[in-house]
Structures are given as structure tokens and as C-alpha cells.
Amino acid sequence: MNKLKKIGLSALAGSLAMTTANAVDYVIAGDAAIGYTGESANTSIANGDGFALDTSIYLDASGSLDNGWNVSFSMDWDNESGTVANTSTQAAVTMGSMGTIQINQIGGSAANAIDDVTPSAYEEAYGMGGLADGTGATGAARAAGDAGFFGSSTNSGSIQYTLPALEASGATVTASIGFDPASNTGAASFNGTQGGESGMFYVLRVKHESGLEVGAGLEEIKSERVGLPTAGKDAKDEESVTAFAKYAMGPVSVGYQESYQDSIDGAADFEANMWSIAYTAGDMSISYGETESITKGLAATAERTTDADAIAVSYSMGSMTIQAQRSEQARSVAGTAGSTTLDETGIKVSFAF
């Protein structure tokens, strides 16, 4: 028995020695923001004017293994909605020339990273607030005018592999492929009308030293339905695509992007295009952007088009950043006169610590 105890203690000591031999870096950071949003619309809206506090805490850990691989974990906590919640969690293993494997528990996928890459000094033109777009076939409300829908279906609960960056002729090429065994079920899922279907995504980005960057993404969701009894709907897979181009020259950067989604099981399809221009001089940035988001008609529901534009400015002074934005949105319904409008003004003062 004593010999067994000695063997067990020796094994434990060896295990601890192996664990502590590799240094692990822990970083805790955060920020806090005070914001004000003013809204005006020609119809009833959910929020209206109001002040808000937003506090975030970022937890990161990283270390190296004996074989030279690097392992990292990250977790973000935020109370923007009034309740403290885990808004982002990922783990990655970087294997040198073999690439990187990453688990996206909540957010962080390469597909969702290119949902909208157009430059902005604050939020996207549609990012401050949305116009209600009725309900889907299952009664799940969607946010109209959200042009950044690409990648949301496989953004949480997925695994992805990223090839090592390839550099040639002044260009850097990165490529990622991901798998989500239960897509459309994440907290940020845009079209979660079914849930539980498996999905794949593919992302390619090319960045040139001249300042030009182009990229594209494809997201495919496999339908588990054999047929649907609802009139006007058929069981079919979902496919989303996006493509973008950005160019930066000195203090000026411009970007243009288009996205399309052929929704699963005959749900309403989406398409969007967006562009913006930004100017940065030292600690100050200013941007202007426009988006058009279309929810295709389905059965008795007519096609809806939401146009948005916004001008934003940002100024940093050490750890303090002041941001302001004015956005205007208008939604029109095919076959219906007039439009629903929403104008918003937002101001935010944030502090990093």
C-alpha cells in the first residue's frame, strides 16, 4: 500500500511539474461606457430616448506547449442589455506551419468576422437600432435592416481551421473552413427558424500591401426537413454568400460589400449591400455609410426594403474615447404607399482600464 501511495504521489508530482513548466499568461482587461441614444420615428418604437451604462470585462489566457504550439482562451462579459452575460468565448490551438484550430462557443467565427467589413467610426449605418420587420413563419421576430446577417447561423458552437497565412507578391492570403453540428441555434442566429441543422462555412481573404483587401465567404446549412406543410414553403438547404472590397490610402479608407441568403426550408430570403468611407487623422476619425437590406416576399407577406445611412465621428484621448453618430432608416413595403422611418442620435463616452 505504501508503495502504491509513493507511486501515486510521484505521478502527481510529475504531472504538476509538467503543467507548471510552461508559462501561462493571464490578462484581465475591461472598459466602461456611458451612452445616450435619442430616437424619433413616425410609428411606435420599442426603446426611445435613454441613458445607458455598458461595462465589459475581458479574460484571456495563453501559453506555449513543449512542441512549440500555442494555446489561448478568451471570454468576454458584458452588461449592455442590463444583465451580465457571456457574449464571446473562444479557444484556439496554433500549430505553427500546420495552421490554427479554433472552437467558437459564443461568437468569434471567421464567417461572422466578415459580416460587414466596411469602415466606421462608431456603429454600422443600421447598427444603433432596427425597425421591427414583423415575424417569421414560426413567430420569431427578426430585426429589419440588419445587413450583417452573413455568418450568424454558424457563429456559435462551431469549430474552424485556418491555414497559415500565405505571402506572395506583396499579398497575404488567409483561408478558413468551419463546421457547426447545430447551426441556427446560437444566440446571434439571424434566421433561427428551425435549429439543429449542421452547417459549413468557408472564408477567403486577400490583403495587398498597396492597401487593397478583397474577400468572400460561403455558408451552407443542411436542412433536416423532408417536407413542410406550410403553403409557399419547401424543404431545402440554406446558402449564404458575401463578397467585399476595401481600399486604404493614407488617412482615407473605403469599402463595399454585398450579401445574399437563400434561406432554409423556404423561409424569407435576404439580400443586402453596404458601402462606407472613413477618414482618420491622428486620434480623430469620421465616417459616412449607407446600406440597403431587402427581405424578400413570402406567400402573403410583401417584400420589404430598408435603407439606412449614418455619419459618425470618434475622438480618443488616452484611455478615453468619445463617439457620436446620427443615423436615419426608412423601410418601404412593396405595394404600400409611404414608409416607416427611424432617426437616431447616439453619443458614447468610454474608458478602457
Image (cartoon, grey):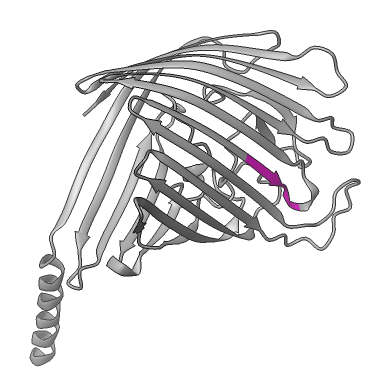
Question: In this view of the protein, can residue 109 be seen by the observer?
Answer: no
Label total for image? 0
Residue positioned 47% across, 36% down in the render: 246
Q: Is residue 78 above or below residue 336?
A: below
Q: Is residue 260 magenta?
A: yes
Asked if one can make out residue 76 in the rendered structure from this viewpoint, the answer is yes
Q: Is residue 140 above or below residue 46?
A: below
Q: Residue at x 64, y 57 (%)?
A: 220
Residue 188 placement, left or right of 91: right
Q: Is residue 209 left or right of residue 15?
A: right
Residue 253 at what x, y percent from top left? 41, 28
State which quadrant residue 97 falls in.
bottom left
Residue 124, horizontal then vertical, whole percent: 51, 26
The residue range painted magenta reads 259-264
Q: Position of residue 133 (x, y in %)?
A: 71, 27
Q: Position of residue 78 (x, y in %)?
A: 38, 34
Quadrant holding the N terminus:
bottom left
Q: Quadrant of the C terminus?
A: top left
Q: Relative to the observer, which residue lies in front, 171 or 3?
A: 171
**Is 263 a magenta residue?**
yes
Q: Residue, x 17% and y 72% (percent of image)?
A: 66
Locate residue 46: give its quadrant: top right
Residue displayed at 8% across by 86% down: 6
Please state which of residues 9 and 171 is positioned toward the viewer in this rendering.
171
Specify the principal SS of the magenta part.
Answer: strand
Q: Quadrant of residue 169?
A: bottom left
Q: Is residue 336 left or right of residue 68?
A: right
